[in-house]
Amino acid sequence: MNSFIQVPSRLYYGQGCLESVKESIARTGAKKILVCTDKELRKLGMTALFEKYAAQAGASCAVVDEILPEPSAAGVEKTLGCVAASDMDMIAAIGGGSVMDTAKLLSVLVGAPYTVRDLLRDPGLARKKYTTLMVPTTCGTGSEATGNAILAIPEEQTKKGIVNPCMISDEVILDADMIAKLPGKIVAATGVDALAHCVECYTGKKATPLSDLYAAQGARLIFHNLEKAYNTPGDTAARQNLLLGAFYGGAAIAGSGTTAVHALAYPLGGRYHVAHGVSNAILFAQVMAFNRDACEGRLAGLCDVVYPELAGKRGPEKADTIIRRIAEIVKNTEIPVSLKEFGVKEEDLEDLVVAGSAQKRLLSNNMKEMSLDDIRSIYRQVL
């Protein structure tokens, strides 16, 4: 098997490593940096220290803080209208997945002859024009490591991905100080999202020896640290481990890809505006239980990495351990698990089935084929 994986060129890791932006600026020669963030993060001062370090390195910053959660094509177009090509030579993102996805899209859209809507139809059109630097402020999306950008499609009440490896970031800074004040519910939701990346990539059809390395080690870090980070906000080591686990999950996506968990989660975000990590958490254990007979060996292999003390157990028991622990983590971090809490009704079920089944790119990577009845059954389990 030919195995290939593309990851960011440079990764800075460790508490306090945001200061490494000075090294990045010195090496790349950046003088004008467009900083993408959102209003809340800017209000919390999350961009101020970055701007200070940039100034010390001789670079100026222009901050765009209009980026909203769950970006749409229209939202990206609005942000693009605020940006002029002559105003920057680097694009930095300080935020969660929405901010980083928007920044990655800007890096291929500013001054381009194509539009974001063109990329939705043909992601291969994208050509990167600016150096990018990602500073995640959540511990789960993995966007800092991928060439993916996810957009809401309101008219279809779902989400779609623009995927092109040219959007993989050049530089990434993983600093636990940037998530030190992250509320527990966001730690939980984004952490479970990252765990889904790892488990789905490890058990997907496109898994390779290289993506397996990232997926398995990311899963190990998240399984062992998510509950600690949720229950003990001051546990900096646990949060730093979650950041690294999330990055590994993103790298695994670049080499493999997510599957039915994400496929069925997208309509929940697109139609009911359920946060992405929560959408995945609601469906995660149910989808993996459905997939179990098609990937028992893969789940058992993952268990060997995450829980080596269970090496003497039989394969079925190890596979069950992974699925059970997924459900336990979702429960222990108090993520809502019923769609009714988000206004989903029985009569909405068929629309969800149609929307979920339309996610062909992700479903085609699922180890077990899903019929409409299978999709319907999984949604019904979480109503």
Image: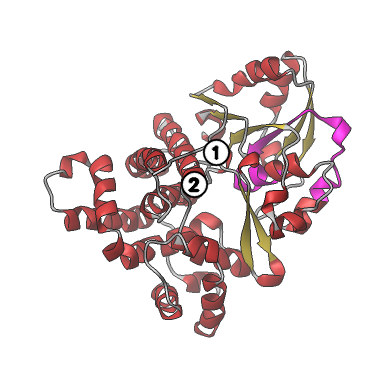
Question: What x and y, as percent, mark residue 319?
Answer: 24, 55
As for residue 80 lying within the magenta part, the answer is yes
For the point 42% across and 72% down, which residue is it? Answer: 370
Q: Quadrant of residue 146?
A: top right
| 233 or 352, nearer to the observer | 352
Mark 1 and mark 2 in contact (Cβ < 8 Å)? yes
- Which residue is denoted by mark 2 in the rendering? 253
21 in relation to 314, above or below: above
Q: Which residues are magenta?
A: 78-102
Whether residue 123 is visible here, answered yes or no, is yes
Which quadrant is the C terminus positioned in? bottom left
Q: Quadrant of residue 41?
A: top right
Which mark is drawn over residue 33? none
- Count of numbered circles in the view: 2
- Which residue is denoted by mark 1 in the rendering? 145
| 91 or 258, nearer to the observer | 258
Give the residue at the far bottom of this rendering.
Answer: 347
For the point 25% across and 54% down, which residue is it? Answer: 297
Give the residue at the far left of this rendering.
Answer: 312
17 in relation to 340, above or below: above
Element class at badge 2 = helix
Q: Residues within 10 Å of mark 1 (few under 14, many from 20)?
A: many
Look at label 2 and name its amino acid: Ile
